[in-house]
Image (cartoon, rainbow, N blue to C red):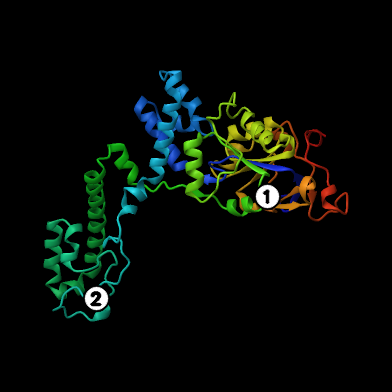
Amino acid sequence: MSSTTASTFYADAVLFDMDGTLTDSISAVEAAWGKVATDIGQDPAYVIAATHGKRAVDNLAQFKPHIKFHEMDREVQSFEESILFFADAYNKHGPGSVPSSPVVSGATTPALSPSSSSPASRASSRASSFVGTLAQLAPFRRPSFLHRVSSLLTISPAIREHEDALETAISEEGADDAQDDWKTMVQKKHQLEAWQLEAAAVDRSVRILPGVKRVMDSIPKGRYAVATSGAKTYAYGCMTRVGITPPEVTITADDKRLKAGKPAPDPFLLAASELGFDAARCVVFEDSPSGIRAGVASGATVIAVCTSHERAKIAHCGAHYIVENMEQIEIVPEGEGENLRLRFVIKPEAAMAPAHQHQQVAPTTTSTTTTTASAHPLAAPPVTAASIAA
């Protein structure tokens, strides 16, 4: 099917993966696994690649085989708390936590010196990183730098001749001093370990991915679930941080009813069962190779999003459709009660995975430019295992 033609099909419910599909906490997750790799003397790049899309319990069992069975739940919780620490550290302990710092303020710069012969317009055009009087800057500058700035400011011709050089020096020194300032403040206030201080230097905040809120808001309650490789601490922590209310059916990695995690289909099969639908009548949204394979194995129709992996990395995992993100997805409820169906429209920019890339072929679809089998949209063929195999 041409990627310029929209595809339409029907299903009963939606099963969402979480991270990389609804939320983006990849940076924090990778930092946490990078720390694990460093702790055990392994290559961080290898550990990060090997752990993506899988349960922490399975990954920790692989990379930390010394953990005893009765200790695993505590280890998983501790690891997932470290993910959330990496996600929050910048705004709780790092530069993002420093209020109204003159170094980063965008306020207008006042006249630099009462005796300055520079016109007001020149004084107010100073670099925004240099704000306030020298006395106000004292807590944020090293004394040696203050002395140099004071000397320069007393020679107004030099200011006019070398303004660009001065602004550059102020900006660079200001950034360095601000960095030193928040680190010193954090160390004194929180007594953080070295890795925690390093975590606070980079913004790894959890973010909601494009199109997610609109898509989730369009699905009636009881018609969607989340099935994630994250345990409850991490899963609920991520969703609530971006304003997503975890649905009543949220299957997490620490659910004792699961015999196996992704790439096994168990999480999606359990989620579909809890919603009261056959997985073959559901649509799975996934981003990772292991998650896509789990969705395909469950019998569901799988839509892969290219939010954490390049298209080439997930093209051979069996997804029926591959889209850039959920901006290309429209879900419209049609009918009521037991007759309610969800109409899925994949917008023209979407690309359908070629049939030779997976054993199953895409479910029966209708082009927006063709006539449907019936005048009533709910009479369209349902997405079933039989129709997929046909």
Locate residue 39 relative to residue 14 in the image: left or right. Answer: left
Q: Could you say which disc has been placed on residue 358 in the image?
A: none
Return the x and y of residue 309 as percentages of the image width and height. 55, 41
In the picture of the structure, the residue carrying the numbered disc 1 is: 220
- Nearest to the observer: residue 11 or residue 142: 11
Return the x and y of residue 109 as percentages of the image width and height. 26, 71
Residue 25 visible from this viewpoint: no
Residue 53 visible from this viewpoint: yes
In the picture of the structure, the residue carrying the numbered disc 2 is: 123
Does 79 sit above or below residue 163? above
Q: Secondary structure at mark 1?
A: loop
Does 126 sit above or below residue 29? below
Query: Residue at coordinates 31% horizontally, 69% vertically from top-left?
Result: 107
Q: Secondary structure at mark 2?
A: helix
Query: Residue at coordinates 18% horizontally, 58% vertically from top-left?
Result: 139
- Nearest to the observer: residue 9 or residue 253: 253
- First in sequence, mark 1 or 2: give its number: 2
Mark 1 to mark 2 CA distance (whole Å): 58 Å
Q: Quadrant of the C terminus?
A: top right
Crowding around mark 2 (Cα neighbors within 10 Å: few <14, some 14 to 19, many 20+) is some
Q: Amino acid at mark 2?
A: Ala
